[in-house]
Amino acid sequence: MTDKRITKSVRMKKYQEVYQTVVKTGDETKKVQKRKSVPKPVKKELPVSSSAPKKPLNSYQAFVREESKKEKYAKLRGSQRLSKIAESWEKEKRKNKLKTKTEKIKNK
C-alpha cells in the first residue's frame, strides 16, 4: 500500500506560486471602502407652553443653588463642589432639626 499523503513541505512548494499570485492580485483589486456617514435624525423641538406651571424647588435644591454661587466653592471641581455642598447641607439640616426640637419643647 502506498501512502498518498503529501508532506507539508511538498504541499507548500506546490501551492507557493499560486499563493503569491493571489496575494499580488488580491492587493491590487482590494479597494478601501469608506463608511458613509449617516446624518443623525433631527429632533423636533416641542413647543414650550408658558402656561405650564413649574414645580418649586425643594429645600435641598434651593440650598444647592445658593451655595454653588459662593466664592469658597469656585476653585473646586464639580464632584468636589457638590460633595462639599452636601456636607454643609447635612450641617444645616442638623441645625434645623435642633431648632425645631427646641421650639417644640418651648411651646409645651
Image (cartoon, grey):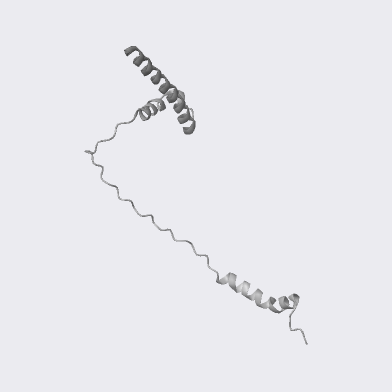
In the rendered image, which quarter is residue 69 located in?
top left
Q: Is 33 in front, or is 71?
A: 71
Residue closest to the far front = 108
- The structure residue drawn at horizontal position 62% and vertical position 72%, both measured from the top left corner, is 24
In this view of the protein, which residue sits in the foreground, 50 or 83?
Answer: 83
- Above or below, 14 relative to 77: below
* Extreme residue in the bottom direction: 1
Q: In this view, does 12 lie to the left or right of 80?
A: right
Q: Quadrant of residue 2?
A: bottom right
| Foreground residue among 36 and 55 | 55
Quadrant for the N terminus in the image: bottom right
Can you give x and y, in whole percent of width and height, for residue 96 in the image?
Answer: 38, 20
User: Residue 13, percent across and down?
Assistant: 73, 77
The residue lying at 44 percent from left, 61 percent from top is: 36
- Say how many tags the image has: 0
What residue occupies the far left of the structure in this picture?
51
Q: In which quarter of the image is the C terminus?
A: top left
Q: Is residue 103 above or below residue 71?
A: above
Name which quarter of the figure residue 47 lies in.
top left
Q: Position of residue 19 (x, y in %)?
A: 65, 75
Q: Is residue 79 above or below residue 106?
A: below
Residue sitting at 34 percent across and 16 percent down?
A: 104
- Residue 82, horizontal then vertical, whole percent: 45, 30
Residue in the picture at 68% in, 78% down: 15
